[in-house]
Amino acid sequence: MSQTAKLELEGKTFEFPVIVGTEGEKGVDVRDLRARTGYITYDEAYGNTGSCQSRITFIDGEQGILRYRGYPIEELAEGSTFVQIAYLLIFGKLPTEPERQRFSDLLTDYQMIHEDMKFHFEGFPSGSHPMAMLSAMINAAGCFIPEVMNRYEPAIFERQAARLISQVRTLAAYAYRKSRGLPAIYPKRKYRYTQNFLHMMFSEPDEDYHLDPAVVDALDLIFLLHADHEQNCSTSTVRMVASSRANLFASAAAGVCALWGPLHGGANQAVIEMLEEIQIQGDDGSRFLERVKQRDGHAKLMGFGHRVYKNFDPRARIIKKACDVMLDKMGIHDPLLDIAKKLEETALNDPYFVERKLYPNVDFYSGIILKAIGIPSEMFTVIFAIGRMPGWIANYKEVIESSDSRIYRPRQIYQGEIQRPYVPIEER
């Protein structure tokens, strides 16, 4: 017998069905609440509102669990690659070798952007932020692909998805080099996904960038760990835009804009800025942490704790290991990294931080890795966008293919002025 929830309003009792997810998550279905009662629910920032039923990603913040399509993130990180995870998220299964090869071939075939897009890049000031360019150029890229502007067609969606996943790294690398006044570097067919991105970022016309396997593996892992994360701000934005039946590229561009915000994708950049501020103060991190414990409002501990995870961020455990391996192999000695290790060691052992579950999260370690690789802080959120693209595409596909999908249209509780007469300007 199915469960129901009872709501009493104005002396009347209403019953609403309860929805139970495959992992036991429970929700009250209030889709016809307003029609039946005249009331709506109020949930600022949607913290307790389920906007969709999804098959893509499961998170249990209390237990520190993250799964893509049912697979634990720990197992995927150990045995898979970003390209395979992209296929898993979008198409719902891990690819066979022929499927992986076909998808990889599509990524290679579509990695070049249209030559005329160079003129779009030339229109940006040299100091433009890479995220601004990335959002604009994803939208522009769709204009060069007539099929993108047509109605959704399952038969060609694999090509569209591969084109976007492939070209986002080309656009990102071009945006970085434009922001530094450097010439664009073309991708090479011989390089795999993450290798090609590093090549386009750091090679010069007369000399290719040395692709250190430790660096390639660490960056590929960052992409993989950021590939999807349930209904966060940017993913919800992509779904909202998709609900209007906007095309895939327009929806992804909107996701980039949402991700740009410092409360979302800018967290790993904030970690580096925090470390730099500690260094300027001549501190090794000890005094800073004491200020945090004393609740000094000017001492904000970035990269620790998480809104969803009330336990340890499972991605942080994975990326910490990769961070240690990469830094050891590269032999990097950076004062900022010494400060980061001090913060990490203290937070993992000091009762103040342990009791409050302020563990280092994925942003803390990814920021350290990206800095060690030589990627500037203004590109950190761009890296996040590249990694998150498969998740956005998967959610776009889920919205478009849903038979009962409606255009998103949240309600509000109006708190403004009540009706009042218009006053002509000469009488005001």
Image: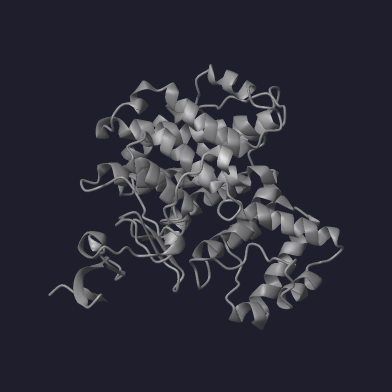
Which image quadrant: the N terminus? bottom left
Q: Is residue 392 left or right of residue 374?
A: left
Quadrant of res 187: top right
Q: Is residue 399 left or right of residue 215?
A: left
Q: Is residue 78 above or below residue 182?
A: below
Say which residue appears at 72% left-offset and 65% top-offset. 341
Quadrant of res 272: bottom right
Q: Is residue 398 above or below residue 418?
A: above
Say which residue appears at 58% left-offset and 56% top-offset. 263
Say which residue appears at 69% left-offset and 32% top-offset. 179
Say which residue appears at 42% left-offset and 57% top-offset. 414
How many marks are shown on the rendered structure? Answer: 0
Q: Is residue 151 above or below residue 420?
A: above
Name, please, the residue furthest toward the right: 282
Q: Is residue 362 visible?
A: yes
Name, please, the residue furthest toward the front: 427
Q: Position of residue 152 (x, y in %)?
A: 28, 33
Q: Position of residue 145 (x, y in %)?
A: 40, 23
Q: Position of residue 150 (x, y in %)?
A: 31, 26
Q: Position of residue 102 (x, y in %)?
A: 35, 33
Q: Is residue 92 left or right of residue 134?
A: left
Which image quadrant: the C terminus? top right
Q: Is residue 172 visible?
A: no
Q: Is residue 406 above or below residue 184?
A: below
Q: Nearer the viewer, residue 285 or 247?
A: 247
Colour scheme shown: one colour
Q: Is residue 330 left or right of residue 74?
A: right
